[in-house]
Image: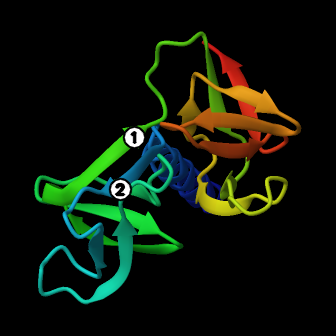
Amino acid sequence: MKRIVFCLMALVMWAWTASAQAQVPSVFTVVFATSGDGFLNVRDQPSMKGQVVEKLWMLMHGLGNGVLVESGPKWSKVRVNGVTGWVYNKYLDSQTWYDGNGTTQLVAAIDDMPIYRDNYVDEEDLLLFTTVKKGMVMADQYDTWKEYYVLKTAHDFLFIKMTDAEVIKK
């Protein structure tokens, strides 16, 4: 009887783990504000009555400063500077890093994989932009620079350490 219970528990844990992994987004999307005042309030709930917990700015040097977590009809969940909250979609835009047209995919190989950005003061010293979960597809078009894979924005770049990501042939 104990063996059956153990096997059932193992099966449930496996199914739960597989379900959780299936929910990992397959696209890395950078978000930014398009409002006239240059930013969007990030709120603790999807309502104008929600408390402001962070700000999402317009494009900075061609790069958004937040990451899309979940998209909805009126409000979207975003992560900015390690804070997760909600922004009103009317003033939100995005850049998606995977379009599916290439022959390879750049995939996160470690949990909470860091992605870096330029710091505009010291070209050699990159700043942490965000982290993504293992298995996230970041791009199918990228370059290399030193020990990094480089994702291109309008005119800036995101950097991923080669030891943190994996290139998978389709």
User: Residue 160 placed where, x, y %?
Assistant: 72, 44
Q: Nearer the viewer, residue 136 or 149?
A: 149
Q: Which quadrant of the structure image shows residue 111? A: bottom right
User: Residue 12 placed where, x, y %?
Assistant: 50, 53
The dot on residue 1 is none
Compared to residue 69, the image places residue 98 above or below, namely: above
Q: Is residue 53 visible?
A: yes
Per the image, label 2 sits on a secondary structure element best described as: strand
Nearer-N-terminus badge (1/2): 2
User: Residue 27 placed where, x, y %?
Assistant: 45, 38
User: Residue 113 placed where, x, y %?
Assistant: 69, 53
The dot on residue 32 is 2
Left or right: residue 164 compared with residue 60 = right
**Distance from Cα at disc 1 to Cα at disc 2:** 9 Å
Per the image, label 1 sits on a secondary structure element best described as: strand
Could you tell me which quadrant the N terminus lies in? bottom right
Three-letter amino acid code at the position of disc 1:
Gln
Q: Which residue is mark 1?
A: 95
Could you tell me which quadrant the C terminus lies in? top right
Left or right: residue 26 compared with residue 135 = left
